[in-house]
Amino acid sequence: MSKKNLNILIVSIGITIFGFLMDGDAKEPSATMRFVEFFAMIGIIFIISFSITNIFSFAKNRINLLRR
């Protein structure tokens, strides 16, 4: 895993932990549901941030190729 992807994963985990701690469910879910929610949130945030990073990287490289 490249350093950029690892950094995105670390930020995703941090955001997920913060969101998970700030979550105020009226009814406490089971432990299994908590794990599923936690890993689903990490996956969603990682995929979104990874996609945005790759789109900007692709666009930047494409613009540099067109300028030549």
Image (tube, helix red, strand yellow):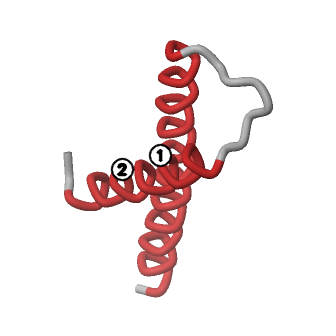
Side of 39 relative to 29 (left or right): left
For disc 2, the marked residue is 9
Side of 17 relative to 25 (left or right): left
Amino acid at pointer 1: Phe
CB atoms at circles 1 and 2 under 8 Å apart?
Answer: yes
Which numbered circle lies on residue 46? Answer: 1
Q: Nearer the viewer, residue 21 or 64?
A: 21
Q: Residue at x 65, y 20 (%)?
A: 29
Secondary structure under tag 2 reads: helix
Q: Measured along the vertical axis of the image, is residue 22 above or below residue 30? A: below
So how many labels did they put on this image? 2
CA gap between label 1 and label 2 equals 6 Å
* Residue 62 place in picture, x, y as percent: 48, 70
Q: Measured along the vertical axis of the image, is residue 11 above or below residue 21? A: below
Q: Residues within 10 Å of mark 2 (few under 14, many from 20)?
A: some
* Residue 35 place in picture, x, y as percent: 48, 23
Which numbered circle lies on residue 66? Answer: none
Q: Nearer the viewer, residue 36 or 4?
A: 36
The part of the image, by quadrant, that contains residue 14 is bottom left
Side of 24 relative to 9 (left or right): right
Task: Say which label, 1 or 2, has the lower sequence index.
Answer: 2
Q: Residue furthest front?
A: 27
* Residue 16 place in picture, x, y as percent: 51, 47
Quarter containing the C terminus: bottom left
Q: Residue furthest right?
A: 26
* Residue 54 place in picture, x, y as percent: 46, 57
